[in-house]
Amino acid sequence: MSSEIVVIPQGGVASVRGFLAGAVRAGIKEGVDRLDLGILYSQQPCAAAGVFTSNRVKAAPILLCQKHLADGRAQAIVANSGCANACTGEDGLRQAYEMAELTAAKLAIQPEDVLVASTGVIGSFLPMDRVRSAIGEIVLSSKGGDDLARAIMTTDTVPKQIAVRFDCQGSRYTVGGVAKGAGMIHPHLATMLCFLTTDAPAGQGFLDAALRRAVDVSFNMITIDGDSSTNDMVVVLANGLAAGEPLDAQHPAAEAFCDALAQVCTYLAKAICRDAEGATKLIEVRVEGAASDADARLAARGVAGSLLVKTAVYGEDLNWGRILAALGGSGADMSEDKTTLYLGGVCLYRSGRPLDYDERAARAALAGAEVELRLELGLGEGVATAWGCDITEEYVRLNSAYTT
């Protein structure tokens, strides 16, 4: 018996048995020659769970998905880029439902078993004449995950996919995932677009709990620019083709499944930060010794989200006082006299005093593609890790001309 989690080479959302995917160029955004409409489909009905943006402005696809997931079941997702279908009122809602109906007809399933996801510019309508014909043209296969990953990209520069597997008591379970996201990233309860698949026979209640646990330590711990989106969603589909007894909290494979799901989510969350708009560096902030885990989360996200920390990292500027200032403003309990700060393996500050440190080593820790910050607060047992990225001139350029 083994529960070692193994990454599947070139794996993705359609690497899980029974799942197919595909995408086409529908021409949703004028003048852009790229894949922009795709489908993820399970050949068997699935238990399903989702988490969605906490933004009070919710796109039409979010409202549809919340309704369709009320029974804890789904079998397909249709997704597009180039248009968010947000702030579009009743007409936008009708477009989202029509996308579900068209996909259901293509797959010979019920519209209520189809989820819809959209990403792109807010405040514009979908060109439904193009969408209607394009849905029928999508060819689904077990090799179509990469096309789907590319079809949901907006300002992303690379597709983001992963799949892992583990064995337990003679059964093999697989978990796959795909995500997009590069800007408007500061999630709470969900993030960007992320679709997860598994062949585990997970009960819906267990699946929902496992998803929320995985999202909480991954997507909910990243920040790029402090803005949350109208379209953020993370959805998991479990088709049960691994067979065996349904997974619940007492199942021998339960812990390994939760770990695998969290590993997939964390990989995708970090991939989003690496590929953030204009970013050149991934920032990891590890907080230890906080008064509680909740405080550790506040502290880690506060530092990772600080614009002054982000710009210092971009400029490779050893202005480490910005890190302590961000910590102090995070809302987490802290004491200067008990706080220790590390940049990579270099200790910069301890017990209320700056230290003499190896400046060459500290600058080297800032020079790489990944910058690690560690804060020891000396107040308790709370721990958390957050991820962010640097802010560059390219981020400003991209977002000052996004619709043009």
Image (cartoon, rainbow, N blue to C red):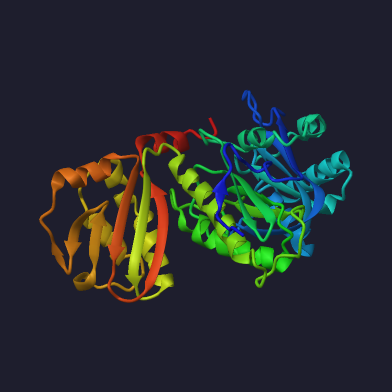
Residue 32: x and y in percent read: 62, 25
Judge whether 51 appears above or below 366 on screen. below
With 402 as the anchor, is 81 left or right in this view? right
**The one of 369 and 81 positioned closer to us in this rendering:** 369
Asked which quadrant contains residue 386, the reply is: bottom left
Residue 340 lies in what quarter of the image? bottom left
Quadrant placement of the N terminus: bottom right
Task: Kindly identify the residue that appears in the image at 57 percent across and 38 percent down.
Answer: 9
View extreme (left): residue: 356
What residue do we see at 73% from left, 58% from top? Answer: 48
Up the image or down, 167 lies above or below 104; here it is below
Vertically, is 42 above or below 261?
A: above
Task: Give the camera-side residue of 248 and 217.
Answer: 248
Q: Quadrant of residue 73?
A: bottom right
Q: List x then y, in percent, for residue 67.
A: 76, 59
Residue found 24% across the figure and 73% down from its top? 335
